[in-house]
Image (cartoon, rainbow, N blue to C red):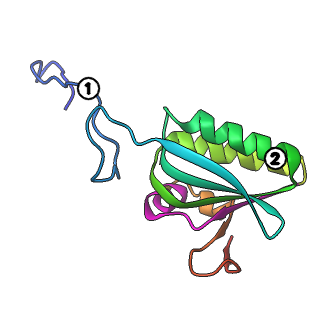
Amino acid sequence: MRPNASNPKVTSSGPLPPVGSHENRVVGMRATLEVVPVAVDGHDVLLVRGDIDATSVDRLSTAIHATMDRSAMVVIDLRDVTFMDSTGISAFVEAHHRSTERSGTLVVRAPSPPADRVLELARLDQVLTIETAGSDHSLRS
């Protein structure tokens, strides 16, 4: 609750934890984000591990841009993402636009439940090519 005229004593020690935050999150501690570029079957794949949030999204965006600069097809594997907020949405929207401008292909592979939920809420599952975890060849959208 925020302080207001009817409840002026309500205070907060800081922002509330984001919806969907994982149980391993410790107040004041952030999981790190690791982005590892690998080549799989001739395609550039970014293996993403950890939290995608305001403190880490620049690392993800930089890796996506660098990969797009050298490859027409970029696969971003999200199976090990433990948390994603709206900054992740922005990064994927920007990557989609950049890929489209360059006539490239952007594929999101195997999003973890937290990442998948955010992509669905933002309706990016209707825009991005998303490979499900069950099969590398089964595509949504």
Q: Nearer the viewer, residue 40 or 77?
A: 40
Q: Nearer the viewer, mark 1 or mark 2?
A: 2
Query: How many callouts does the rendering have?
Result: 2
Where residue 50 appears, as percent x and y from the top left, is 47, 49
Where residue 108 appears, as percent x and y from the top left, is 66, 61
Which residue is painted at 80% across and 70% down in the image? 41
Query: Which quadrant: the C terminus?
Result: bottom right
Rendered image: mark on residue 23: none
90 and 28: which is toward the camera: 28
Query: What type is the residue that disc 2 sits on?
Result: Met
Q: Residue 17: percent from the left, percent from the top? A: 30, 40
* Element type where label 2 sits in the image: helix
Residue at point 46%, 41% (across, down): 32
The answer to whether residue 110 is above or below residue 134 is above
Q: Which mark is residue 14?
A: 1
Residue type for callout 1: Gly
Quadrant housing the N terminus: top left
User: Do callouts 1 and 2 mark residues in contact (Cβ within 8 Å)?
Assistant: no
- Residue 68's disc is 2
Residue 137 in the image: state x and y as whole percent: 71, 80
Q: Is residue 129 above or below residue 4?
A: below
* Image position of 109 with respect to 13: above or below: below
Q: Secondary structure at mark 1?
A: loop
What segment carries the magenta color? Answer: 104-120
Residue 2: quadrant of the picture: top left
Residue drawn at x 48%, y 39% is 53
Distance of mark 1 from mark 2, alpha carbons? 37 Å
Crowd tier of the residue under label 2, counting other residues whose Cα lies within 10 Å: few below 14, some 14–19, many 20 or above: many
Left or right, 1 with respect to 128, comes to left
Does residue 15 belong to the magenta stretch? no
Measuring 81% from the left and 47% from the top, which residue is drawn there?
68
Mark 1 or mark 2, earlier in chain: 1
